[in-house]
Image (cartoon, helix red, strand yellow):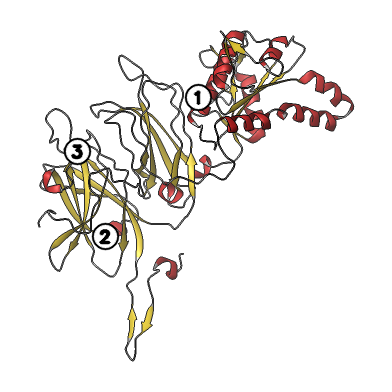
Amino acid sequence: MQQAGSLYPNVGASMGAGGPPQFTVPVTKVQLSVSAKKLKNKDVTSKSDPVCVLYWKDIHKNSLHELSRTEKMTDSLNPQWVTKFDVDFRFEERQVLQFHVFDWDNNKQEVSNQDKLGWTEMTLAEVMASGGEPLARTLNDGGGGILVVAGEEVVESKEVVTLNFAATGLDKKDMFGKSDPYLVISKAVGNNHQFMVVYRTQYIKKTLDPVWKPIVIPAGLLCGGDDQRPIKLEVYDWDSDGSHDFIGECYSTLAELKQDKQFPALGFGGRVPPSGQVSHEFFLNGRTDTPYCAGVQGILEAYRHSLNTVGLYGPTNFAPVIRHVAQFARSMQDGKNYFVLLIITDGIITDLPATQEALVAASALPMSVIIVGVGDEDFTAMEQLDGDEKRISFRGQYAVRDIVQFVELQRHLRVMASSLSLGRANLAKDVLAEVPQQVLSWMKANRIQPGTPTPSVPGAPTPSVPGAPTPSVPGAPTPSVPGAPTPSVPGAPTL
């Protein structure tokens, strides 16, 4: 149970000179999420571009005052707006809200210049009394449509999280290309686990293996201070006409996303069930949605699982796995992330030219590659990849820097036979010997100074192509709809 002092921070009393105590009105900060369904299409050659505008109704003067407005959703009759409405809830007052939806077709800021799609009215008490369950209302004077509103108390939290998302092997949705995927993040609201959108990425053109830019978002917005609150992740293929194709979805929690010591583990050179198809880039844990394993124990369990389910198959190709990790490194070059790929192999490399090409390309990225050779094979080719004596090259192009360290396990096993602790210590030392200098060389080359990065203010990344879904979160410095909302706007809808 929350203490009254924190739930109603403005409750208090003061004694004037000789007068009675003056009480302030209890106030709670609440946040409203809005979406709409089955809106009327007001555009001839495309779909409506809806914006939702929130008004406070002065019941004494019978007038409306604009409080805020959402971003514009291009070509959508079922918009799920990212922008939230932050309002003060005074439970002793009757606070009447009106939600007006417009088809926003020009750069003018006045709502009188836009086509009306409908409006509805409700009290803030009605929204909050639903216990977090979304409240649906039919829109008036617009030709139909339903507005859905969900409200919850704002949790005071200074925590800001950075999330990195990528996907592999997405469905091909475009007839003459691949897909243009974007990611939508939603949080559960109410007891029936309906979901409201909190973030939408920009789309990436023509790829089935997207790596989206890092997402910086307040934890309070993402999960309302509850790390176990369900989060839905959806991937869509963006289409210019707004008919975005659904690709797939999965569910998680912030607690799962924040788990420490989560390591992606990939396998190569195996016949993967159920089809037995040969793969040089499969998830070691046997899953199809994520390669991550919980700590070293999780990696060992995933390895044992693969030994029992995956058929061994040659040749030994390194290039696919190196390119896989390079995808992540290429999208995160701000100095906050550095990737170390550990490859354990008992076979002779069979795609040396392709591996050299992949390593030369990766040498400019924030990543290192450690190769541990297991067994009695001839690992001479591995020594060629370790550029200590001669920088590796491919077709005349040399690596920007040395990013490879090769270690032969057999040499350390001999030491372990006489002293296990000494052998393990020497192995760890050799494996990590070059990583500090490799990290430092990349940072210096990219002029990144030591220091603690300051989290960026959550905002909407700019779409790479006009018309892309535009993400927007509270706190973005520029409203997506032309003109910043003011407490009272001339030309507001008349009652």
* Residue beneath the point at 39% across and 45% down: 188
Disc 3 + disc 2, Cβ < 8 Å: no
Identify the amino acid type marked 3. Lys
- In the displayed structure, 89 sits above or below 300; it is below
Question: Nearest the camera: 154 or 162?
Answer: 162
Q: CA distance from mark 1 to mark 3?
A: 39 Å
* Residue beneath the point at 31% across and 14% down: 176
| Residue 327 tag number | 1
* Residue beneath the point at 74% across and 9% down: 378
Residue 351 visible within the image: no
Q: Which marked residue is nearer to the observer: mark 2 or mark 1?
A: 1
Q: Which marked residue is nearer to the observer: mark 1 or mark 3?
A: 1
| Residue 2 tag number | none
Q: CA distance from mark 2 to mark 1?
A: 47 Å
Q: Secondary structure at mark 3?
A: loop
Residue 158 visible within the image: yes
Identify the amino acid type marked 2. Leu
Image-based side of 266 in relation to 174, left or right: right
Q: Tell me the quarter of the image containing the C terminus.
A: bottom left
- In the displayed structure, 57 sits above or below 181; it is below
Residue tagged 3: 38
Q: Secondary structure at mark 2?
A: helix
Q: Mark 2: few, some, or many residues within 10 Å (few <14, many ≥20)?
A: many
Identify the amino acid type marked 1. Gln
Q: Earlier in the sequence, mark 2 or mark 1?
A: 2
Question: Nearest the camera: 39 or 212?
Answer: 212
* Residue beneath the point at 45% across and 65% down: 2
On the image, the x and y values in percent for residue 232 come to 41, 38
Q: Residue furthest bottom?
A: 18
| Residue 124 tag number | 2
On the image, the x and y values in percent for residue 64 come to 16, 59
Disc 2 + disc 1, Cβ < 8 Å: no
